[in-house]
Image (cartoon, grey):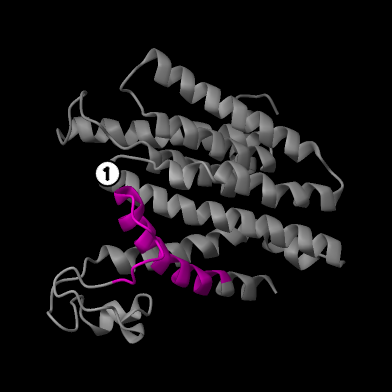
Amino acid sequence: MSGLVVVMAAVLGLVVGSFLNVVAHRVPAGLSVVRPASRCPGCGNGIAKRDNVPVLSWLALRGACRHCRMPISARYPLIEAGTAVAFAVAVLPFAADLDRAVDVRTLLATTLEVVAFLYLAAISIALAAIDLDVKRLPNAIVLPAYAVGPALLGPVALLRGDLVPLGTAAAGAGAAFLLYFTLWFFKPGGMGLGDVKLAGVLGLFLGFLGVPQLVVGVAAGFLLGGVFGALLLVTRRSSRSSAIPFGPWMLLGAWVGVLAGQPVAAGYLRLVGLS
């Protein structure tokens, strides 16, 4: 069953990835993601359904508009394929629980948990793309996650009869938000308020999984971002005053916590002799 779920998640990711391309393009500009329908910016012709199949259409058209041959950025199929991979990977931590589900209650709880983390994967892709493009993390994507997360994860805890994850989720959201707010407050320009607001969202999802996932996820974001910044300085591709988008590293670090937080934390504790 778990293998089928991974394949289904990947297919869903292709479709969602196509929509995320629209989100990444329109949300920073303050445009509707629903209307108008997508058009070629070169000739103005609408995108036909046959030319809107994720990845395959871009390959069939050889990366250019069917009508005017204006080049279509390779970012479009990359986001579609990347979302498919992200969705497939996102369900892996929950695959065993799906296989072990012995009643409808347990199956429903795990399914809702999967949906919650697929949602996190989707906004992770969109936010990373936008932050790399315009160095912003739009409220229109970040703030709704404060409601969507509890709306999906709350019933999971209730169905399982265990409310502790809700407590750690709330604590994780508060702790991560406070940490980033403190850094923003005492070091203006080091990061933006968008990073602070995103930290609360990531803390919520990581905290729901557990304290090890929370600690590893937050720490990994700083570590990855720091290593990337250091590499840019060493290769002289940036200076100490250069603005480097930190959102993508926060998101990547969070997914390290989701996927490997427990074993990484356990391994670290053994390494320092605390376990």
Point out residue 274 in the picture as x, y percentages from the top left corner.
68, 24
Mark 1, residue position: 134
Give the left or right position of residue 165, taking residue 273 as reference: right
Q: Is residue 106 above or below residue 139?
A: below
Q: What residue type is labelled 1?
A: Val
Find the magenta span and give its range: 9-38
Residue drawn 67% across the image and 70% down it = 2
**How many numbered marks, from 0 up?**
1
Residue drawn 16% across the image and 83% down it = 67
Q: Is residue 220 above or below residue 8?
A: above
Q: Is residue 51 above or below residue 9?
A: below
Point out residue 158 in the picture as x, y percentages from the top left corner.
82, 48
Location of the N terminus by quadrant is bottom right
Residue 93: image quadrant is bottom right
Location of the C terminus by quadrant is top right
Q: Is the magenta stretch mostly helix, strand or loop?
A: helix
Can you see residue 266?
A: no
Residue 145: image quadrant is top right
Give the left or right position of residue 192, taking residue 269 as reference: left
Element type at mark 1: helix
Closest to the observer, 209 or 186: 186
Residue drawn 56% across the image and 56% down it = 119
